[in-house]
Image: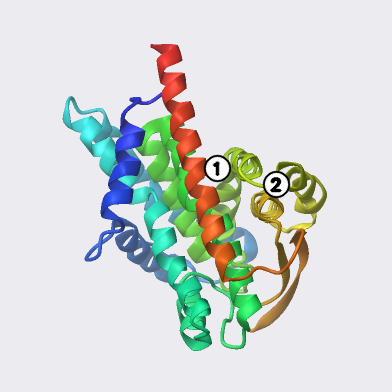
Amino acid sequence: MIGDWLMPLGVLLDVLLGETRRWHPLIGFGRLANHLEARLNRQQPLFFNRLLGILALLLAVTPLVYLAYLLAELPLYGSLFSVLILYFTLGLHSLAAHTRPIATALNAQDLPTARAQLARVVSRDTTTLDETDIAKAAVETVLENGNDAVFATLFWFALAGAPGALAYRLVNTLDAMWGYKTPRFYAFGWAAARLDDALNYPPARLTALTYALFGKTRQALACWRQQAPQWDSPNAGPVMAAGAGALDVQLGGAAVYHGQEEIRPQLGAGSAPVAADIDRALTLINKGVWLWLALHAAMGLWHA
């Protein structure tokens, strides 16, 4: 295990300071990714565009991860750098900061504001969503990003330190930017999407188990087993099915992405989500983080 105290410190910084307001490293990385995509995504035949996507991924990720490795190995300052990397890559505080205003707007019956707030965190079309659809979309993004921005980051930090957490978040960011099945990104974003699937496979299942432990456990496990295989994502399926079952809400159904309606399988059980379920989903994540920190500390003591 990487420095037993580094993970709690990184989480504490995220909770106390939140997301940096002026300049965030992942925003800078996003600009680099846009620059590379503009230069390399030339709409070549499928095979060559996949190669160009692999090249872009390597150019974007490899130098930064290698630099993180070198800095994390420095005497004294390496530990401080590792804590800062976890702080910058963890999205626990920002997830709540971006989704709680949606619940606030719904409680005030201010649908235009709720739609606008939701549009900041999802890629689907929010302009025609009603109150139930907004709550559903918000709960879905909380549960899915609970894995992507929180638990998977903690998993790779525990396993491989600062370089592991950074590599995961950079690949995850590239998948969010390039991993669309559109003519522009279908081939170019293939490598980022597949690598993100691979890196998310173990933590997604641990996240699903964590959600199940802090909700309706039997129902969550049953939804995971029965419903997750129907979802097109191998990792979002278990996470969202278990989370929906734990919260006793129904997710999935129709959603519009890039002008096209997608009919997604139903996930979970119980009633349709309401505004309060957004906070319940965030609470599920917070409880899970405490559990993960406790297990991390226990494993550190075991190996001491």
Question: Residue at (47%, 67%) from the top-left corner?
Answer: 99
Q: Is residue 133 above or below residue 236?
A: below
Of helix, strand and loop, which one carries label 2? loop
For label 2, the residue is: 216
- Asked whether residue 302 is in view, the answer is yes
Mark 2 in CB contact with mark 1 (< 8 angstroms): no
Q: Earlier in the sequence, mark 2 or mark 1?
A: 1
Question: Which quadrant is the N terminus positioned in?
Answer: top left
Looking at the image, which residue sits at the far left?
76
**Residue 52 shown left or right of residue 72 in the figure:** right
Residue 186 - label: none
Dot 1 crowding, Cα within 10 Å, few <14, some 14–19, many 20+: some
Of residues 195 and 105, the one drawn nearer to the viewer in this rendering: 105
- Residue 184 rendering spot, x and y as whole percentages: 57, 73
**Residue 93 shown left or right of residue 53 in the figure:** left
Question: Which quadrant is the C terminus positioned in?
Answer: top left
